[in-house]
Amino acid sequence: MKQARLYDQPEQFAEMMKRHLAESLQIDVRLTEGEPLLLEMDDKIGKSQVSLHDTYRTYMAGGDLNAAVDYLNDIVRSSRIACEKKDEVAILDPDYIYPALRDEAYAEATRKQAGGLSAERLPGLREMYIEIKDELTKVITAGMLELNPDLREDELRKIAYRNLRRAGWQEPRMRLPTLLDTCRLEVYMHDTHPAECQFLDPELNKRLGRNPYLVAFTNRKTVMVLRADEEMETLRQAQRLAEESGFRTMAKRSVALMPSPVSDRIYWVRDGKAGLLPPRK
């Protein structure tokens, strides 16, 4: 049963989040004019913006404030760590940089707002580069590279994938049945570092063998894979399995209900190369 929602309008939800952030961090937090789900903060290390769009969408889909509260707590924790390590925030450690997939709209907004760096990777998704160290996650921007002259933009992908390979292949946390007896769902959930790009790296994805499979990068810490015991060599075969197994529905549900959604697009992987799988007409 869905829970009754307390905040049906974006302005109401944003006001609640703004109030809690301001009280927890003792800083000035404002709603952006004309864009209430984009908060502006003035903290001890400078001005920053916080997007509530995905959190609000998740809240509206389920009515549960828990995800919003968790997101809020993450912001508070990250802000406090950043303030404590103010002099270290701009310093990047190459050993902790990883590739991560984000929706192209998010990547473009990050580029405009903060100079976030990204590269084309898949239709609808771009590859960004993040540093995860000491409980702090940083999206790497052009400004950060200026403060770290030993790092060059054209080296980021090489460095990020070196670290990803060093971490090794991440196994699925769950294997679940589907609506088709010939198909199985594998759910990869990663906590220590973003591992979604392991499916795009030839050295790592060979662990899945050469048989075609479907993959959806639904949430920042979740990747869903559909594998089949029947052929998936043609577009029609792949589309039929995506629909009749319930995989496409599960991907949409994960994006709608789980925290930090990325995309409900489904990609068809053959010979280690991924391409967008359009819905069956």
Image (cartoon, grey):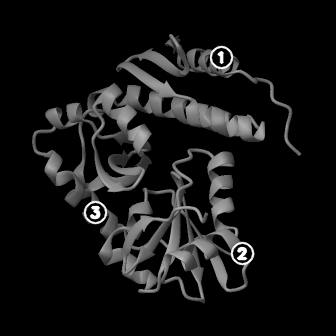
> Quarter of the image holding residue 4?
top right
Residue found 43% across the figure and 56% down from its top: 194
> Quarter of the image holding residue 175?
bottom right
Binning the other alpha carbons within 10 Å of mark 1 as few (below 14), some (14 to 19) or many (20 upward) gives some
Question: In this view, which residue lies farthest toward the front?
Answer: 281
Q: Which residue is mark 2?
A: 178
Please name which of the two marks, 3 or 1, marks the residue nearer to the observer. 1
Q: Which residue is mark 1?
A: 11
- Find numbered disc 3 in the image and state the secondary structure of the residue it sits on: helix
Residue type at tag 2: Thr
- Above-or-below relation of 102 to 87: below
Q: Is residue 260 left or right of residue 145?
A: right
* Picture coordinates of residue 253, whole percent (x, y): 68, 54
Q: Is residue 141 left or right of residue 227?
A: left
- Find numbered disc 2 in the image and state the secondary structure of the residue it sits on: loop
> Quarter of the image holding residue 145?
top left
Q: Which residue is mark 3?
A: 161
Residue type at tag 1: Glu
Residue 35 seen anywhere in this rendered image of the structure? yes
Task: Measure the alpha-carbon separation of dots 3 and 1.
Answer: 40 Å
Q: Could you tell me which quadrant the C terminus lies in?
A: bottom right
Question: In this view, which residue lies farthest toward the left?
Answer: 149
* Picture coordinates of residue 57, whole percent (x, y): 65, 36
Question: In this view, which residue lies farthest toward the right?
Answer: 1
Binning the other alpha carbons within 10 Å of mark 2 as few (below 14), some (14 to 19) or many (20 upward) gives some
Residue found 27% across the figure and 41% down from its top: 117
- Find numbered disc 1 in the image and state the secondary structure of the residue it sits on: helix
Sequence-first tag of 2 and 1: 1
Task: Measure the alpha-carbon separation of dots 2 and 1.
Answer: 39 Å
Please name which of the two marks, 3 or 2, marks the residue nearer to the observer. 2
Residue found 73% across the figure and 34% down from its top: 65
Q: Is residue 255 left or right of residue 171?
A: right
